[in-house]
Image (cartoon, rainbow, N blue to C red):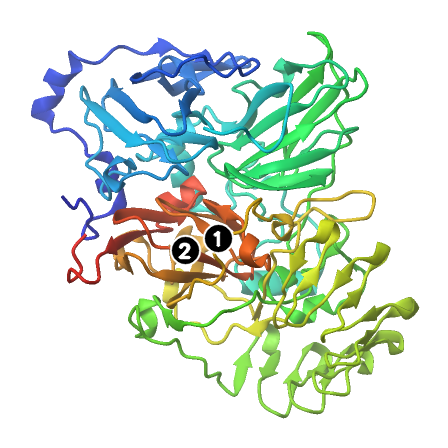
């Protein structure tokens, strides 16, 4: 049976409100609001046996965080819900009983299962009515750290989520002595529907970090793009309390260890809207799993975890500590924390708080901003952050097609690549893609022709054989001779590679970039013009240039020799996969938005207006994301793995969530092996509810399109 429809709004699909005549009868089955408990989470122990049937009850509750009590949705009486532990190879049976007075659901995030068990109302099933019990039953085909949450309305924000841990059949490729869950979330005592309503009235409603004094010229640029450089998070610490395992920072959740032990920490970002930057001052963290999948170990000082991602790390404290597990929000408006200690009650210091980061014009692909002096990689008050190297990811063979219905292309047609002769820019800046060059602010010229690119102060950039002339006489040559850099450092974009500190090699040619620990990175070309926008009112502004940013740590973070931050190009699958699979089609998806109206969409169309994306069972497709907005978007595809095109070749990491940065163009490859109807959306809850969601239907091509 097919439950997929796109003729009504998503909200109607998700709520399934009971009729007035039935409500009275169903109320007899419902329980009154009870006081929810914070889920007590201690050291994880692998069970001797795994239950054949698990019963879960979803009910309205009242939850106390600090000195404030608010409505919550609990699972089995706790927030977060109970930890579900399964074994790879078993048949999982989970009975979910709805004790709410509205419909509910549970989605098993990142789990490969039959479509009708995926738990998305209106797409894969009808939802769970008040008073009803739905039986989820599916084979467990994987292992690792995952989670579950409601896919109905905004229930996830109210506490309807929990951890899902699947133990492997075979021994894991890493060892550890202790095992802990670190589940991060954002909590508010404000009704989430009111939050969404306020955001629609003003996208900066919860932004208490706006600048009072700024640069007049920069502020004009931002005003024309209807954005604010402090737009890092839609909802901030002024509204949210950030929880770790259901506890606020002052509760100091503690994990115990003995010096010399290896401690596994399973990080899950179960937030509705919050990115966290994770560090444990005094300890290195070795990433061993990403989104439940084994990766080649990479040791870092810090990593950013997007909404719905999971990372498993190993730490080895040699000293008694204590150590602070510090999860700072990306916008620096708050944090969650815990302590690693040898005894209960120990408290470690909170690391110094960092200044809030600021968006830059480079985050919108505005090259004239990148040319300004005094920029740094971090960004923040009093400084402007550089965007990056401006490169796009590798491409393979196969037909390229567009799902941008607004452009007049169907799912099999090639997208338009022609550019207008002149692109109008803010403040009358002009960018010409012809041989005459690009006119830039203050009369600076940028030419993509054979004569090179004229830069500020007369600096020249030549993409031809003569190289690129840079400030202070530094030369950049994209040909075989390499790039002359300050202090005699050489960058070669040809076959010889780039000389880097400590012998690290960067090769911008066909072999990719050799990175620390042998990681390879293929940047491909150096960015590309976005082209004219045809997304309508659903897209307020588009970047001038888009580029691959998988090698960047993200706004507010900076990679240095003393402080290594995880980037997506660090991730490599532990085992190789078949890299000879032919990509048959490329689907280009623009992530679009209008901040003034709080409209979020794909290709300028919200969910209720969007056509269904059709994939064919057995094909290999490349999904290319083009982020036209100033916000990060953690993209989640249900039912199938996304293999990130990060230059790792046969070792592409598998992810169920990929965070796409502003003005970024990046790709994933998908083996379409799951028939049925699936959801595909941004995992920022309010973005998804506002329309940033698509339905995907996997059909049998040979059977004439039958599911």
Along the polypeptide, which appears first: circle 2 or circle 1?
Answer: 1
Q: State left or right for residue 71 relative to residue 68.
A: left
Is residue 243 depicted above or below 517 in this figure? above
Q: Quadrant of residue 356?
A: top right
* Res. 143 mark: none
* Vertical relation: 126 (above or below) 20: below
Q: Residue furthest right?
A: 487
Mark drawn on residue 670: 2
- Closer to the camera in the image, 286 or 623: 286
Residue placed at 19% from the left, 62% from the top?
702
Question: Residues under labels 2 and 1: Cα distance?
Answer: 6 Å
Residue 397 to residue 206: above or below: below
Q: Is residue 430 left or right of residue 403?
A: right
In the rendered image, residue 90, in percent from the top left (x then y), is placed at 34, 26
Which sits in the foreground, 624 or 294? 294
Give the quarter of the figure containing the N terminus.
top left
Percent across and percent down for residue 525 are 61, 72
Query: Which image quadrant for residue 547?
Result: bottom right
Please say if the residues under marks 2 and 1 sit with CB atoms less than 8 Å apart.
yes
Q: Is residue 78 visible?
A: yes
Q: Position of residue 532 (x, y in %)?
A: 46, 76
Q: Using the image, tell me which numbered label, if any, was put on residue 643.
A: 1
Residue in view at x 38 percent, y 19 percent: 71
Which residue appears farthest toward the left when viewing the image?
21
Give the crowd class for mark 2: few <14, some 14-19, many >=20 residues within 10 Å.
Answer: some
Residue 378 visible here: no
Q: Nearer the viewer, residue 578 or 344?
A: 578
Q: Furthest residue to the top? A: 344
Horizontal and vertical percent position of residue 236: 56, 36
In the image, residue 439 sits, relative to residue 606, either above or below, namely below
């Amino acid at each position: 049976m097919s439950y997929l429809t796109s003729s009504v709004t998503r909200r109607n699909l998700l709520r399934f409100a009971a009729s007035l005549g039935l409500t009275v009868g169903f109320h007899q089955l419902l329980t009154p609001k009870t006081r929810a408990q914070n889920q007590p989470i201690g050291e994880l122990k692998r069970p001797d046996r795994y239950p054949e049937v698990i019963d879960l009850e979803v009910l309205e509750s009242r939850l106390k965080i600090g000195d404030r009590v608010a409505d919550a949705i609990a699972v089995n009486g706790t927030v977060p819900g109970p930890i579900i532990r399964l074994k790879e190879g078993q048949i999982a049976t989970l009975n979910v009983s709805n004790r709410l007075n509205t419909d509910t659901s549970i989605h098993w995030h990142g789990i490969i299962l039959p479509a009708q068990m995926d738990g998305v109302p209106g797409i894969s099933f009808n939802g769970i009515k008040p008073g009803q019990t739905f039986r989820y039953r599916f084979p467990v085909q994987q292992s690792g750290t995952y989670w579950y949450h409601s896919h109905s309305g905004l229930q996830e924000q109210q506490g309807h989520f929990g951890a899902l841990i699947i133990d492997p059949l075979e021994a894991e490729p890493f060892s550890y002595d202790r095992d802990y869950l670190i589940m991060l979330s954002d909590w508010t005592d404000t009704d989430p529907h009111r939050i969404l309503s306020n955001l629609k009235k003003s996208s900066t409603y919860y932004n208490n970090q706006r600048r009072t004094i700024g640069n007049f010229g920069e502020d004009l640029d931002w005003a024309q793009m209807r954005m604010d450089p402090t737009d890092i998070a839609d909802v901030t610490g002024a509204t949210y309390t950030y929880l770790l395992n259901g506890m606020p920072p002052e509760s100091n959740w503690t994990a115990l260890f003995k010096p010399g032990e290896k401690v596994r920490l399973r990080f899950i970002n179960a937030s509705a809207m919050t990115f966290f930057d994770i560090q444990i001052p005094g300890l290195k963290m070795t990433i061993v799993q990403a989104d439940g999948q084994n990766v080649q170990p990479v040791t870092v000082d810090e990593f950013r975890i997007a909404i719905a991602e999971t990372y498993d790390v190993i730490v080895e404290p040699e000293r008694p500590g204590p150590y602070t597990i510090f999860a700072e929000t990306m916008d620096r408006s708050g944090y969650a924390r815990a302590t690693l200690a040898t005894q209960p009650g120990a408290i470690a210091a909170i690391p110094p708080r960092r200044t809030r980061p600021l968006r830059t014009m480079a985050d919108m692909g505005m090259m004239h901003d990148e040319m300004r002096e005094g920029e740094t990689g971090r960004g923040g008050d009093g400084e402007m952050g550089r965007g990056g190297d401006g490169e796009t990811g590798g491409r393979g063979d196969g037909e390229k097609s567009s799902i941008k219905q607004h452009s007049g292309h169907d799912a099999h047609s090639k997208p338009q690549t022609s550019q207008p002769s002149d692109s109008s820019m803010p403040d009358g800046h002009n960018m010409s893609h012809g041989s005459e060059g690009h006119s830039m602010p203050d009369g600076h010229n940028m030419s993509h022709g054979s004569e090179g690119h004229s830069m500020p102060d007369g600096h020249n950039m030549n993409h031809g054989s003569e190289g690129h002339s840079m400030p202070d006489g530094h030369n950049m040559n994209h040909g075989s001779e390499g790039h002359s850099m300050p202090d005699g450092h050489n960058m070669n974009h040809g076959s010889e590679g780039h000389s880097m500190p400590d012998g690290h090699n960067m090769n911008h040619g066909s072999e990719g970039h050799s990175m620390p620990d042998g990681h390879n990175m293929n940047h491909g070309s150096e960015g590309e013009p976005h082209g004219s926008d045809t997304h309508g009112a659903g897209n307020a502004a588009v970047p001038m240039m888009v580029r691959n940013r998988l090698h960047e740590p993200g706004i507010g973070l900076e990679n240095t020799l003393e402080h290594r931050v995880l980037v997506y190009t660090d991730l490599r699958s532990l085992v190789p996969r078949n890299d000879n699979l032919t990509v048959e089609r490329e689907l280009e998806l623009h992530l679009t938005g209008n901040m003034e109206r709080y409209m979020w969409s794909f290709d300028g169309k919200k969910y209720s207006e969007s056509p269904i994306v059709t994939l064919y069972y057995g094909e290999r497709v490349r999904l290319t994301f083009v982020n036209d907005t100033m916000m990060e978007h953690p993209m989640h595809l249900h039912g199938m793995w996304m293999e990130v095109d990060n230059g790792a070749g046969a070792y592409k990491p598998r992810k169920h969530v990929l965070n796409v940065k502003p003005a970024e163009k990046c790709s994933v490859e998908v083996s379409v092996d799951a028939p049925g109807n699936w959801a595909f959306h941004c995992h920022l809850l309010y973005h998804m509810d506002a329309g940033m969601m698509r339905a995907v239907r996997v059909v049998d091509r040979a059977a004439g399109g039958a599911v």
